[in-house]
Image: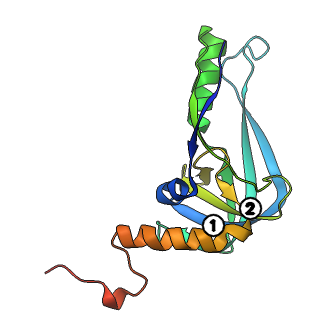
Amino acid sequence: MSQIHYEDVSLKDLVSKAQFILVVEKTEPFLTTEEIPIHRNSEKYPPFKKYTYHFKATEELYNKSGISQIGKQINVLPGDLETDLTIHKLYYLEGIAKSPIYAKYNTRADFFKADKLILFLRRYDEKNLEIIADGAYEDLSKKNEIMDLIKNKKLSEGENEDPHTKIKPR
């Protein structure tokens, strides 16, 4: 029997691993579902359900890509989508039950009730971003704490807010 295990991550870990940290608001439709067939016989081998959440980016707290997301509609996939798809295929096609270990952040924010959230994301593909861990979102009340962690992240990566004060190599 497959069991899911979680490894707790801190807010600092989320900031450290995120490619994008965005303030977002929900758009309509908020959730879309796509069924991905894993076999021609979909009765015996049920398709995998891929969920996509839809938001509009209203503010960037951190963006490693350099391409602004502000004002854009963004598609957000749950974290570990590829792992979930692989486990689904293994179970239904080969009868193998795997017990994954997922990263999990313990947030107080309610993903489904809050109209605005701070999301911790990475690029999944050309069209989609992916939540970096289960629960990798936070309430706007944590914005200042997150901004402090981002500032420390930039300093440790050698980034600086003012490009004129950055030391250039010879």
Kindly identify the amino acid type of the residue bearing the numbered disc 1.
Leu
Question: Pointer 1: residues within 10 angstroms few (<14), some, or many (20+)?
Answer: many
Residue annotated with mark 2: 55
Kindly identify the amino acid type of the residue bearing the numbered disc 2.
Phe
Q: Secondary structure at mark 2?
A: strand
Seen as rendered, the residue at the extreme left is 170
Q: Is residue 2 above or below residue 20?
A: above
Classify residue 54 by image quadrant: bottom right
- From the viewer's perspective, tell me whether residue 100 is left or right of residue 153: right
Measuring 73% from the left and 63% from the top, which residue is drawn there? 139
Image coords of residue 81 (percent x, y): 61, 37
Identify the mark nearer the N-term, 2 or 1: 1
Q: Is residue 40 above or below residue 33?
A: above
- In this view, the residue in front, 41 or 142, is 142
Check residue 22 in the rendering and tell me which mark sits there, or answer none: 1
Image coords of residue 79 (percent x, y): 61, 43
For the question of whether residue 68 can be seen, the reply is: no
- From the viewer's perspective, tell me whether residue 165 is left or right of residue 97: left
Q: CB under 8 Å between callouts 2 and 1?
A: yes
Measuring 76% from the left and 10% from the top, which residue is drawn there? 44
**Cα separation between marks 2 and 1:** 10 Å
Q: Is residue 15 above or below residue 102?
A: below
Position of the C terminus by quadrant = bottom left
Q: Is residue 165 above or below residue 12?
A: below
Measuring 36% from the left and 68% from the top, which residue is drawn there? 156
Image coords of residue 157 (percent x, y): 35, 67
Counting the numbered discs, the total is: 2
Image coords of residue 5 (percent x, y): 61, 29
